[in-house]
Image: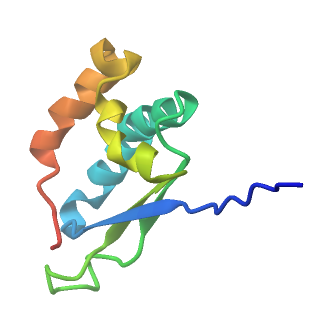
């Protein structure tokens, strides 16, 4: 008898951002109103396993701009899904008003931490 043994390995990406305190409300609004829909669509289409968004510090308390205030967690079921993560931006939501608003919001989301 031959048994197949599979190893399950998920891949996790974590992106950090430092958002100045005067922009936190707008930043979080765009994530919840726009980008969460894009990511949910990717999950529904099988392009991503899960996602999470966290405020990890209050910018009013963190003066150092190299310290992140927010974290985005993207979970992929396997390396193939991770390697094809560009599908998130090329799926059927790509021509929708939601996706267009998400792309337009990138101009305002210039808050990155290495």
Expressed as whole percent of the image width and height from the top left, the position of residue 95 reads 29, 13
Would you place residue 30 above or below residue 87 in this image? below
Q: Is residue 5 above or below residue 35?
A: below
Would you identify the image quadrant in which residue 100 lies?
Answer: top left
- Residue 50: horizontal and vertical position, in percent? 55, 50
| Colouring used for the render | rainbow
Residue 7's place in the image compared with 101, above or below, is: below
Judged left or right of residue 4, residue 66 is left
Tell me residue 42's x, y (percent): 46, 33
Is 71 or 84 nearer to us in this picture? 84
Asked whether 74 or 47 is in front, the reply is 47
The mark total stands at: 0
Q: Measured from the top left, where is residue 11 in percent x and y? A: 46, 61
Question: Residue extending furthest right?
Answer: 1
Q: Quadrant of the C terminus?
A: bottom left
50 on left or right of 39 = right
In the foreground, 24 or 73: 73
Residue at image coords 37%, 46% = 31
What residue is rendered at 25% in x and 85% in y? 62
Which quarter of the rendering shows the N terminus?
A: bottom right
Q: Is residue 101 above or below residue 57?
A: above
Q: Quadrant of residue 6?
A: bottom right
What residue is shown at x 64% (from left), y 63% (from top)?
Answer: 7
78 or 31, nearer to the observer: 78
| Residue 96 left/right relative to 112 | right
- At x 17% / y 50%, what residue is drawn? 109
């Amino acid at each position: 008898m031959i048994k197949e043994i599979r190893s399950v390995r998920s891949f996790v990406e974590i992106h950090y951002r430092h958002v100045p305190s005067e922009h936190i409300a707008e930043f979080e609004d765009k994530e919840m109103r726009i980008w969460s829909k894009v990511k949910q669509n990717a999950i529904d289409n099988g392009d991503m396993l899960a996602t999470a968004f966290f405020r990890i510090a209050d910018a009013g308390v963190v003066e150092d701009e190299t310290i992140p205030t927010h974290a985005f967690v993207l979970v992929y079921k396997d390396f193939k899904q991770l390697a094809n993560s560009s599908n998130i931006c090329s799926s059927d939501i790509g021509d929708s008003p939601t996706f267009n608003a998400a792309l337009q919001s990138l101009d305002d989301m210039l808050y990155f931490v290495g």
